[in-house]
Structure formats: structure tokens, C-alpha cells
């Protein structure tokens, strides 16, 4: 029996041309879903001269909505003004599933709310970790609880991220899956690793070890947004001490942000211009070229749900020194990493330990690339995400989706009902005052939807012709076998499709 294909809209403020892990995740996942026969479009905000509709590789269509950006590429939350545009796009493209990305994306939250009002299935992917005590986190968590109270299913990129999201949004853990990020191995090859076009039939890479002498220069690479939560303050304090303790060492730092001025002042104060190279912002396609100039990748982040960049670094043959926070310990096996506490002294000590070990030849990075390629694959991520779509659309039974009979579990069926009264019951439980406010918002959204249906009838909206689709695979048993194998082999710390 052939697999069912879906029309999917990925909605988020975070997408190309701005760089980042969420942006790369959305693009790669969308491309692989298209390869599997689905129709995928992306809805994001306008970016400089990118407005209207753009086409990317593989027929991926991007709608750039002209909304005001207020902070870190997130648009100003308007709640209802996005609805007419989203409705028009969803009708034109015959969308069946709206998939939102990012806890801080206003377009994502509004898109999920309006999609539920329109009777569309919804999925949310969380890529971040948040606290519970500060004012910003409290507000974000309350809004997340509002949106996820009526979402069909949620996806997190690590087990730590799942625990965090379940607590923040008071979710049923069964309604949250863990599906990791991945990397395109061919795009992150070590320096001497042949490109795919240079690999003939029967090719097998035999990487040569990168042995370092006591006087050879070791280059430490840092590629990150230069914000507080990425540990830029720790990096600024640690660099002079690391360079003082290890003379034949230098840094290459790529990225931009408000903390860049602190790094520049540190370089000026300590006269380190010849040992610290600041590249500024770089394009995602240039990341590999920067990484292959180094030997060690330093990642001093204070919070991280997954950390795709450390997988990219390991794939490029770099040894990784990173803070032991969030979902980072789940990402790579221990022989590829040295962990440090998010403290200046510990980062200096861990980096020094890695430098000494590399000079002594105790760390062999030449096989990292092949190991990472086996662990992370976007095709596998797309296949498992498709299974989530099958589960929420009823293509597969709930028992098959969740792995057991749900009839006696927490009031039976997990599939969300679109009836307004059932939706209001779910929102009403979000808090004494917040629940009433959320119910009012949903009622207004529903009335607005009825107005749009009358003012702009569906039959007056032109239907867009579809980009030619690839025929879906007919062998579903092979996909099921791959999913079963990924549950037992693709995780460093337990199964990644844990519910």
C-alpha cells in the first residue's frame, strides 16, 4: 500500500537568509519531505529585499510576509492580522497540516492558533530551552501553554528539550516525540576528505591521522551568535587565559551579535590581534571552510536544546569542547567531546586538557566524519516526522502510532477535536484568569474566521498549481524497519523517538 502524502506549511519567523540551527532544520526537513512525495511550503517574514514568493531548490516555495521585526528576527505579535494572509495561503496551496517551529516565533504561534480555527491539523517543534523564574520565561511559558493546549502533537529535538517543554506547557508526555536535528554529511567533510563527485564506485575513505608536534599551531574555532545565552561572556574571559597557558594556540571566531564589541575590546586590551581572528557573520555554506581550518571546536553555551553546530564540527573532524548543559550531552559520544561546567575556570581547564591530548596524539579525529554520518541523517528525521503526520491525521491507528492501546489511557483518544466547545474546554484549563482570556481570544478568532469566509469566499481564491511531485515509495515495511532500527541505534543516550 502506497504511503499517503500531505500538503504541509512550515511556519516560523526563523528562516533563510538569516543563519541558524532552526533555519537549517526547517530547510533540510522540508527538502527531505518533498523528496518523499509531500508538498511543502514555508511561511516566514520578509527579510530586507526578500518579499512575496520565492522558490528554492527542489521546488520549495517560500512566502515572505511583510510583518514588522522587533527583536532577534521575531515579528511583532499581532494575534489576528496574520489570519487573512494565512487563510489565503492555506486555501491557495490546499494545506492540510500547519507545522510551526520555535517558542519565540510569533508567526508560529499565531499560525497554529488560526490553523486550528480553520480545521487544519497542527504540529509544533520546540528547538529551545527556557527557565521558569524570570519574567520573560514566565510570559513565554504561559503563551506556549496557550498554543500547545490545542496542538495535535509536539516534537522536541532532545530528551532534555522534551522534559523542559512538557513542564513549561503542562503537556501530556505522550503527546511529545523526540526527533533530533541532523547534518548533511557531504557538506561537512574534513579538510582532506574527497567530495562525493570525486568518489568512484567502491570508494572507501581511508583518512590519515592529523598528528601534531609540540610546536605546531593548534587552532580553536568558535562559530556562534554572539549573545549572552551562547556563553560569549565566558568566551571573552577564557580566551586570554587559554592563550597564555598554551603559546602555540590561536582562535578563529565567526558570528555576530551584541557581545561582539566585548570580544573586540578584549582583543585590544590584551593585544591578541595576531592570535584571535574575528570573521564576523558568515553564510551557512561557508561554515565548513572555516571549521576545516581548526583542530578544536569550543562551544561555551549556557543553554542549548541540541547544538547542531557541534555535530557539524565533529563531522568536519574537529574535537569538541562544550559545556555540559541542556541536551548537549545527548548529541555526541564521549570520545568526540570534553565537557565543562558553564564556568570560566572549567572551560579553561577543559580546553587545556583537549589541547594537551591532541598534542600527545591521544585524540584521533580522522574517523569522526564517517561516525557522524551514520548517527545523523535528514532522511531519517523526515521519515520519523512523516510518521507523526500519519498519527495525527489518522492514517495509522493510535495503537500503532503510540505503541500501545490508548483507549484506557487518560480518557482515551489522543486526537484533538475541532469542535469549538471542546477547544474552549482545553483553553479554559490554562489558568484562573489566563484561561478566560485565552477562551475569549479563541472565540474572537472563530468569529473573525466566519467573517473572512463571508467577506472573501473560498471559491474566489485561485488554487495554485502544484510543483511536480516525486512519486511516494510503496514499500512501507522498509520505512517501519528503519524507524525500529533508529530507535535502538541512532541515540547516544536512549531512543530518540521516545514518547
Image (cartoon, rainbow, N blue to C red):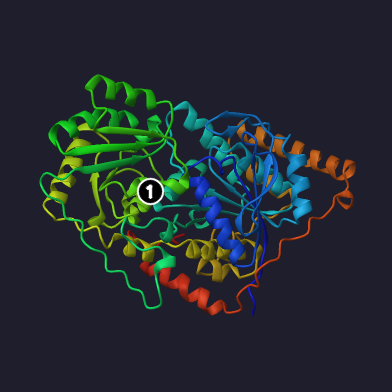
* Residue 56 pos. (x, y %): 62, 52
* Residue 290 pos. (x, y %): 36, 45
Judged left or right of residue 468, residue 240 is left
- The residue closer to the viewer here, 109 or 281, is 281
Q: Tell me if residue 67 comes above or below residue 205 in the rendering.
A: above
Q: Secondary structure at mark 1?
A: helix
Give the quadrant of the N terminus: bottom right
Q: Residue at x 15, y 31 (%)?
A: 244
Judged left or right of residue 499, residue 468 is right
Residue 342 seen in this snapshot = yes
Q: Please name the residue that numbered disc 1 is placed on.
A: 289
Mark 1 crowdedness (10 Å alpha carbons): few <14, some 14-19, many ≥20? some
Judged left or right of residue 480, residue 247 is left
Dividing the picture into quadrants, the one containing residue 4 is bottom right
Q: Tell me if residue 451 comes above or below residue 491 in the rendering.
A: above
Q: Residue at x 23, y 31 (%)?
A: 238
Judged left or right of residue 212, residue 286 is right
Q: Residue at x 36, y 58 (%)?
A: 189
- The residue closer to the viewer here, 245 or 414, is 245
Dividing the picture into quadrants, the one containing residue 84 is top right
Amino acid at each position: 500500500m502506497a504511503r499517503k502524502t500531505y500538503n504541509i506549511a512550515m511556519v516560523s519567523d526563523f528562516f533563510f537568509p538569516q543563519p541558524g540551527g532552526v533555519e537549517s532544520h526547517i530547510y533540510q526537513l522540508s527538502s527531505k519531505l518533498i523528496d518523499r512525495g509531500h508538498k511543502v511550503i514555508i511561511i516566514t517574514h520578509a527579510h530586507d529585499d526578500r518579499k512575496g514568493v520565492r522558490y528554492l531548490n527542489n521546488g520549495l516555495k517560500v512566502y515572505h510576509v511583510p510583518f514588522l521585526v522587533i527583536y532577534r528576527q521575531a515579528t511583532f505579535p499581532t494575534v489576528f492580522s496574520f489570519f487573512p494572509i494565512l487563510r489565503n495561503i492555506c486555501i491557495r496551496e490546499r494545506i492540510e497540516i500547519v507545522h510551526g517551529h520555535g517558542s519565540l516565533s510569533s508567526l508560529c504561534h499565531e499560525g497554529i492558533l488560526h490553523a486550528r480555527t480553520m480545521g487544519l491539523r497542527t504540529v509544533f517543534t520546540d528547538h529551545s530551552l527556557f527557565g521558569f523564574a524570570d519574567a520573560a520565561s514566565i510570559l513565554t511559558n504561559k503563551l506556549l501553554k496557550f498554543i500547545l493546549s490545542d496542538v495535535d502533537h509536539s516534537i522536541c529535538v532532545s530528551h532534555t528539550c522534551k522534559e523542559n517543554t512538557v513542564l513549561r506547557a503542562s503537556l501530556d508526555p505522550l503527546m511529545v516525540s523526540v526527533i533530533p536535528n541532523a547534518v548533511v554529511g557531504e557538506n561537512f567533510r574534513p579538510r582532506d576528505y574527497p567530495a562525493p563527485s570525486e568518489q568512484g564506485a567502491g570508494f572507501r575513505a581511508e583518512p590519515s591521522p592529523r598528528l601534531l608536534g609540540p610546536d605546531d599551531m593548534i587552532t580553536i574555532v568558535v562559530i556562534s551568535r554572539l549573545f549572552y545565552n551562547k556563553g560569549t561572556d565566558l568566551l571573552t574571559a577564557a580566551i586570554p587565559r587559554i592563550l597564555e597557558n598554551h603559546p602555540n594556540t590561536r582562535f578563529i571566531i565567526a558570528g555576530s551579535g551584541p557581545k561582539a564589541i566585548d570580544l573586540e575590546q578584549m582583543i585590544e586590551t590584551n593585544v591578541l590581534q595576531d592570535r584571535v581572528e574575528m570573521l564576523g557573520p558568515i553564510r551557512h555554506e561557508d561554515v565548513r571552510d572555516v571549521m576545516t581550518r581548526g583542530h578544536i571546536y569550543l562551544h561555551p553555551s549556557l543553554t542549548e536544546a541540541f547544538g547542531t553546530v557541534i555535530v557539524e564540527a565533529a563531522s568536519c573532524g574537529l574535537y569538541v569542547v562544550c559545556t555540559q548543559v541542556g541536551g548537549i550531552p545527548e548529541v555526541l559520544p564521549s570520545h568526540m567531546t570534553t565537557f565543562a561546567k558553564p564556568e570560566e575556570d572549567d572551560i579553561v581547564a577543559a580546553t587545556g586538557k583537549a589541547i594537551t591530548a591532541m598534542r600527545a596524539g591521544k585524540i584521533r579525529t580522522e574517523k569522526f566524519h564517517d561516525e557522524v554520518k551514520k548517527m545523523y541523517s535528514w532522511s531519517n528525521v523526515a521519515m520519523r516526522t512523516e510518521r507523526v503526520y500519519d498519527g495525527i491525521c489518522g492514517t495509522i491507528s493510535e495503537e500503532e502510532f503510540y505503541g500501545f492501546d490508548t483507549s484506557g489511557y487518560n480518557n482515551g483518544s489522543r486526537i484533538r477535536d475541532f469542535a469549538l466547545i471542546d477547544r474552549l474546554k482545553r483553553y479554559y484549563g490554562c489558568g484562573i484568569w489566563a484561561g478566560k482570556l485565552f477562551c475569549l481570544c479563541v472565540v474572537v478568532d472563530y468569529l473573525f474566521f466566519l467573517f473572512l469566509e463571508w467577506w472573501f469566499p473560498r471559491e474566489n481564491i485561485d488554487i495554485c498549481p502544484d510543483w511536480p511531485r516525486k512519486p511516494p515509495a510503496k514499500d512501507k515495511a522498509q520505512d517501519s524497519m528503519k524507524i525500529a532500527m533508529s530507535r535502538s541505534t541512532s541515540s547516544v543516550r536512549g531512543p530518540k523517538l521516545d514518547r
